Structure formats: structure tokens, C-alpha cells
Image (cartoon, rainbow, N blue to C red):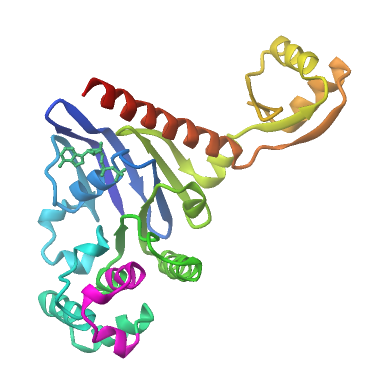
Amino acid sequence: MIKVESLTKKYGGFTAVDDVSFTAQPGRVTGFLGPNGAGKSTTMRIMVGLTPASSGHAEIAGRRYADLPNPGLEVGVLLDASAQHAGRTGREILTIAAQTMGLPKGRVDAMLERVSLTPTEANRRVRNYSLGMRQRLGIATALLGDPAVLILDEPANGLDPAGIRWMRDLLRGYADQGGTVLLSSHLLHEIEVIADDLVVIGQGRIVAGGTKAELLAAAGTLVRTRDLPTLSRALVAADLHFVESTGALRVEADPDVVGEVALAAGVALTELRSADGAGLEEMFLELTAETQRDQKSEGVAA
Ligand code: ADP
């Protein structure tokens, strides 16, 4: 499993990663979600020893990455699919990686097949690969040593819908066999369908975490009525918190509680349901908006 403890990374006076702690469990896909610039890549780079932390540390299977004797056998990593040697063929890249890890050559063909790169494609130079093909090759490299842990930074980037479905199935199968998967994304919907657990990061800080089911349940209740003022007053009187969004109210309470408050207030409802992912999306949009505001104000200051 993966354990990140109080990880902080400062670049000069700027804190890119701020006291980040979370775990990713075996047999589960953990989604690391946050808008661009939130600190996902930096966290992942620290986890695999590519960037030194300012403080805190990360462990994979109980050890720091630098202490793993043959890291490729313990953890598969895909951080930047474009960072592969452009002049080499896909097959060459996998062969060199297999040699470095002391793996039999047959493993290369098995992995090419696993990620659906044809022999012709495998013999093409990587500079002529599409981003989707690079992602497949990167995933093949990550899986090569049959590690128990996978760390993937935005692996769905550049994949078409069929490619995304393929990767989702691959990672699901991998986790179902007991593997630990940590994958990042800046797209809520992309990660919502595959992740069992979510860790949400914004501006370097963890803002939410838990099982997907918990986070979705915490979204509360969506309620609609033609008489918003009366319902709002009744909710305030009942000490229930809510926010208005697109003509509806999202209330921090279960639907049966909200229904009873409405009934007592004599308000006719046109909709009453669990808010599902709406709360998560709202939180995520707020985060994104704040990040954008920050960038704007930075731009003004500069
Ligand atoms: P994400 O992966 O979530 O998009 P990153 O981890 O790449 O975010 O970046 C987090 C923040 O740290 C960004 O504001 C980025 O500009 C900054 N950052 C990343 N690397 C460096 C660096 N080497 N020097 C200075 N700032 C950096």
C-alpha cells in the first residue's frame, strides 16, 4: 500500500504541496483529484524519489522509494508519457526496462499485447506515436515488473473514449487482483467512474477524502419547489444548512428530513432526491474557481 505523511514541498516562498497525508489501499483504486496546479504531480514525483520533499515522507509497501532494491518490481510508475526516448521504438524501451529489472524477454511481448500495441506499432519510433500510444507504452512499462502498486499521473490524457474504457477495465482488474492503484486526474467524471476511494487536493492541500460512496452520500439532498422563500425559511428554522444552485436547494441532510420540514411548512415540492455527485462537483468547481482567481491575482501582482 501507499502511505503519504505530512508531505510538504516549497519552491522558494511558494508552497506547492502543503502537509499532505493520505493512504491508498490494496485492492482499491484511489483517485487523486484536483484542478491543474493543485500539486498532484509534485506529490507523485516526491513519492517516487524524483523531487525531494521539504518535509514529510511517503512510503510504498512500508519503505521509501529510494530504499526499494528493485523498484520496478514493487511499483509501476507513469508520470509523463511524453518523457520517453523519442528515438527508440516502443519495443526497445520495454526491452531496456526489462533488462534493467532483470526480467525475461518474453515479458516484453506479453506487455505489448496487454496494452494492445501491435508488432508494427511496437517497432515504430516513439516520436511517431500519438499521445494515446505513448500512454499505452507508459502503462506497459509500469506493468512490466508485475508490481503490486501502480502510480499513474493523468493516465487518461490523450486516450480516446475507447482507450479510456480499456484503461479503466485494466486498472479495475489489477485492483481486483489485490493491486494498489493511485491515479490522478483533473477531471471529476473521469475519476468518479473508476475510483473506489478519492483524495481531493486544491492549492496543495487535501480538502476531502474517503470512499467514493461516503463522499457522494455527504452531498446531501437536492430539493426543488416553486416557493423557495418559504422552504428556505423553514430550513433555517430547522437549523439545516443549504446552498442554492440553479433554482434548487442542496441541503446538508437526508431526503426524509428535508421532506418532513417541507411538509410541516406546507410547501409543495417538485423534486426531492439524494444529491449524488452534485456536492462533489460543486466542491470541485469551487476549488477550480479559487485556483483560477489565484492565478489572476498572481498575474496582476506580477
Ligand atoms: P498538478 O499536477 O496538480 O497540476 P503540480 O504538482 O504540477 O500540479 O504543480 C503544483 C504547483 O507547483 C503549481 O503551481 C506549479 O506551478 C508549481 N511547481 C511545480 N513544479 C515547480 C518547480 N519546479 N518550481 C516552481 N514551481 C513549481
Q: Does residue 265 show up?
A: yes
Residue 159 in picture, x, y percent from top left? 41, 66
> Along the line of sight, which residue is nearer the eye, 258 or 164?
164
Quadrant assignment for ligand 1? top left
* Residue 268 as seen in the image, left or right of residue 151: right
Residue at 36% x, 55% y: name it.
Answer: 183
The image position of residue 128, as x and y in percent, is 25, 76
Q: How many marks?
A: 0
Closest to the observer, 12 or 220: 12
| Residue 67 to residue 240: above or below | below
Q: Check the image and report above or below for 14 versus 39.
A: above
Task: Give coordinates of residue 139: x percent, y percent.
Answer: 31, 69
Look at the picture and state if 90 lies above or below 231: below
Determine if the magenta segment contains residue 282: no
Q: Nearer the viewer, residue 276 or 244?
A: 244
**Residue at 30% across / 84% down in the picture?**
121
> Which SS does the magenta portion mostly show?
helix
Image-quadrant location for residue 293? top left
Quarter of the image that includes the C terminus: top left
Image quarter hosting the N terminus: bottom left
Residue 123 inside the magenta-drawn segment: yes
- On screen, 176 above or below 294? below
Q: Which residues are magenta?
A: 118-138
Residue 146 visible (yes or no): no
Residue 132 percent location from the top left of the image: 36, 69
Q: Using the rendered view, name the quadrant where residue 213 is placed.
A: top right
